[in-house]
Image: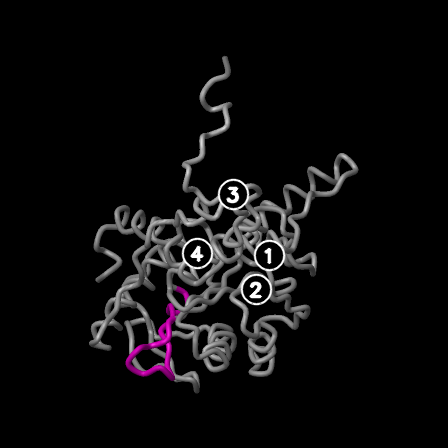
Amino acid sequence: MAPPSATSPELASNEDTTPSAIAPHEPGISKSKAKVQMPKFPGPHAFTDKYAERDYLKGRLAAAFRLFGKYGYDEGVAGHITLRDPVQPNTFWVNPFGVAFSLIKKSDLIQVDHDGKIIDGGEVRLLNAAAFMIHGAVHKNRPDVLCAAHSHSIYGRAFCSLGRKLDMITQDSCSFYDDLALYQSFNGIVLAEKEGNDIATCLGNKKAALLQNHGLLTVGETIEAAVFWFISLEKCCQTQLAADAAAGGRGHETVKIHDDDAAFTYETVGTPHAGWFSAKPLFDVIEKECGNEYLQ
């Protein structure tokens, strides 16, 4: 006798067995089954007081730097994450030049206007010119972007040396389906306004860019989303480098996900809310590991 798991389930007499249009990429699922939804997830904190929002977000930004430090995304003094200020939206907060990611506290952050002038912040008031050129242009071009992240992570810069986009080979890579730009230029450290503007233009309305011979850039409507997209994109680069090497060593190619399936998957794993919620466990862990020290 076959085990229960191997038998066909009995349908309720009133169950609608019409193939679903809700989940067309789940073969055989009925409309009634397709109506079973994921639980309603929490969302980002909502504030009525912009100053309270600023204080909270600066704490989240400090936590983001601790995460980058934990994952080894530092390379000397390179790398930056910026936060659009909710009180003065034409300014942003950024890490002071030369302070280690793993040591950054909320009080260390510096506030910069779109002329590159430091107007507030911690004791170390040094601004990375490349941070201003890239992030200033992104924040100016994209009013929807609260946070932008860029650093010289190992697998990101390795993959960016190939001058190509990601293949859709995993569920995680589908987060970037039709939402990933490729900036095919490298003119040294970004110290010129034109270069920053060119990068922002190339990014367009997408959430991430591969900067050729340079590294990864991600943006988000929340700090959490921008940080998660960076971490996920870094892992996707690592995965593709490994998969391409394994397949190539056997004279094969990786199996690509069909465009329709990648687009369908994106709607679950690639949305701004999915980015925010996916980052929540990471921020919970860093808070547990660091205590309140980063909030000083």
**Distance between the alpha carbons at the discs numbered 4 and 2:** 15 Å
Amino acid on which the number 2 mark rests in the picture: Asp
Which tag is nearer the camera, tag 4 or tag 3?
3
Q: What element carries label 4?
A: helix
- Along the polypeptide, which appears first: circle 3 or circle 1? 3
Along the horizontal axis of the image, is 138 left or right of 225? right
Q: Quadrant of residue 223?
A: bottom left
Q: Is residue 100 visible?
A: no
Q: Which residue corresponds to the image point at 45% horizontal and 68% vertical from the top-left? A: 148
Out of 36 and 82, give the one closest to the viewer.
36
For marks 2 and 3, give the CA distance: 29 Å
Magenta-colored segment: predominant secondary structure: loop
Disc number placed over residue 179 in the picture, else none: 2
Residue 157: assigned label: 1
Residue holding disc 3 = 29
Q: What residue type is labelled 3?
A: Ile
Residue at image position (44%, 35%) is 11
Query: For the residues carrying marks 3 and 1, which lies nearer the camera in this image?
Result: 3
